[in-house]
């Protein structure tokens, strides 16, 4: 991690724990895409491997828990984590025990049987309604499976006050961030508390309403806001510009108008597209590039245009901190992917030149992976909803619940 990012987190890290011979309860995010009874994409499992390997190397006894899908508080074999145990065995190259329930006799026997460096995965915590209800008794039963040490490495779940994320922390001696969680908090924390400037934020995606709090908070934190994607049209229409049949949220026009007036009032650089790629529908291959002001009535805007790309690139190039959430066009279709690709290239180039870049959001991460430039990005955030809430300035319950570093403890 770059030096400039250190010394910010005031929560305990797994590295502060004395792990040898201790059972440690590690909440991971193994909510992975599955195809039948096989793990289809093991990215989330691989992302938490540094934490697991660290704990194994330290001689800890690992009790792992995760949710998977939405079994709605009922035991349902369709939502079993057993395939993930199989994949974890392959990735770690060692046995992984599996408990058929996350609490109760089997889990207790198997956690007690663990020896130093051994790993147990518990069945889906969402088989119990008490998980999402953050039930204290259930939290206590989970905590009973470890020796007072809890680690959260599930940043993507930390915006939810659930038993295996928040409740359990009341029944252990110490609760710390895992290495993945720590990385998320360090990068996102620095961006919202002490960013290198200029700080440019790029927002896109489908809906303004999904990200309105993020827009508002980033207007307080960043120096420049670049808006593309469908969400731009609500802002453009609020200024009386023609947007044809582009996606728009008519009930958010006043809000959009207000935000733009606020930006203008304090000279905040809030940039909207000046041209775009239009077509009759997302399925149409007949496209045109027009200025926003010339948008034909029967067409929709599906990607940002070349002038907008230059305008945005200019801002990205000069930035020292870049946060990007949301594709600026329907990047899933090659005809409307150029804008998003251009942004990906600009963010990657700025990162190579020394800027700190953070990309978050499921589709944005997919877009950056697709561009082949993911390795150039400083930090790819794994927690979609959680990273958005964090950027919106909200406190994440799963982070708040971790043990604070004591004042005499040295920051890392
Ligand atoms: P993320 O998952 O990165 O947070 P969102 O889910 O908010 O992003 O938005 C992604 C979706 O927005 C993509 O499926 C993309 O096709 C869509 N999108 C982007 N620009 C437009 C547009 N101009 N019109 C319609 N949909 C768009
Ligand atoms: Mg999405």
Image (cartoon, helix red, strand yellow):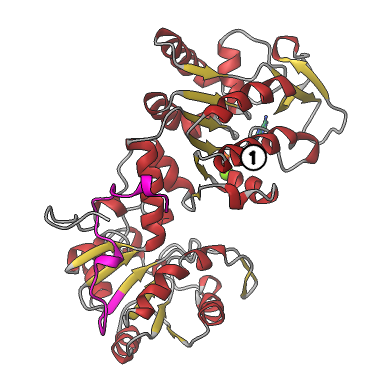
Residue 276: percent from the left, percent from the top?
A: 72, 22
Q: Position of residue 303 (x, y in %)?
A: 71, 29
Q: Main secondary structure of the magenta part?
A: loop
| Image vertical order of residue 131 relative to residue 88, above or below | above
Q: Is residue 15 magenta?
A: yes
Mark 1 CB within 8 Å of ligand 1: no
Ligand 2 - quadrant of the structure image:
top right
Looking at the rendered image, the quarter that the N terminus falls into is: bottom left
Residue 154 seen: no
- Magenta residues, as a range? 1-24
Whether residue 155 can be seen here: yes
Residue at 52 percent across and 67 percent down: it is 46
Element under label 1? helix
Is 258 in the magenta? Answer: no
Name which residue lies at 77% across and 24% down: 278
Residue 65 coordinates in the image, percent (x, y): 39, 71
The residue that disc 1 covers is 344
Give the side of residue 88 with respect to residue 135, left or right.
right
Q: Is residue 200 left or right of residue 112?
A: right
């Amino acid at each position: 991690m770059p030096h400039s990012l250190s010394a910010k987190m005031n929560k305990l890290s797994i590295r502060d724990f004395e792990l040898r011979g201790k059972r440690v309860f590690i909440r991971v995010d193994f909510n992975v895409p599955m195809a039948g009874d096989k793990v289809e994409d093991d990215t989330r499992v691989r992302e938490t491997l540094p934490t697991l390997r660290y704990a194994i190397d330290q001689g800890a006894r690992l009790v792992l828990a995760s949710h998977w899908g939405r079994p709605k508080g009922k035991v349902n074999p369709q939502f079993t984590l057993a395939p993930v145990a199989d994949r974890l065995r392959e990735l770690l190259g060692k046995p992984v025990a599996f408990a058929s329930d996350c609490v109760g006799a089997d889990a207790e026997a198997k956690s007690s049987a663990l020896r130093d460096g051994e790993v147990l995965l518990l069945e889906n915590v969402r088989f119990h309604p008490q998980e999402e209800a953050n039930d204290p008794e259930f939290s206590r039963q989970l905590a009973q499976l470890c020796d007072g040490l809890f680690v959260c490495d599930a940043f993507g779940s930390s915006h939810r006050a659930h038993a295996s994320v928040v409740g359990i922390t009341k029944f252990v001696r110490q609760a710390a961030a895992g290495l993945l969680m720590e990385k998320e908090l360090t990068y996102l924390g620095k961006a919202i508390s002490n960013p290198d400037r200029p700080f440019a934020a790029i927002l896109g995606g489908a809906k303004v309403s999904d990200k309105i709090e993020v827009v508002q908070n980033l207007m307080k934190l960043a120096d420049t806001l670049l808006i593309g994607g469908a969400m731009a049209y609500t802002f453009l229409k609020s200024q009386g510009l023609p947007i044809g049949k582009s996606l728009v949220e008519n009930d958010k026009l006043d809000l959009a108008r207000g935000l733009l007036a606020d930006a203008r009032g304090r000279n905040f650089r809030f940039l909207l597209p000046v041209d775009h790629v239009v077509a009759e529908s997302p399925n149409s291959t007949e496209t045109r590039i027009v200025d926003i002001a010339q948008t034909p009535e029967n067409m929709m805007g599906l990607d940002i245009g070349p002038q907008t790309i230059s305008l945005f690139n200019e801002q990205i190039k000069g930035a020292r901190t870049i946060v990007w959430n949301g594709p600026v066009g329907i990047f899933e279709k090659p005809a409307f992917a150029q804008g998003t690709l251009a942004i990906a290239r600009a963010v990657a180039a700025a990162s190579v030149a020394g800027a700190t870049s953070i990309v978050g959001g499921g589709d944005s991460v997919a877009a950056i992976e697709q561009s082949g430039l993911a390795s150039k990005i400083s930090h790819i955030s794994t927690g979609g909803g959680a990273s958005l809430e964090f950027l919106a300035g909200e406190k994440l319950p799963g982070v708040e619940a971790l043990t604070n570093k004591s004042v005499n403890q040295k920051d890392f």
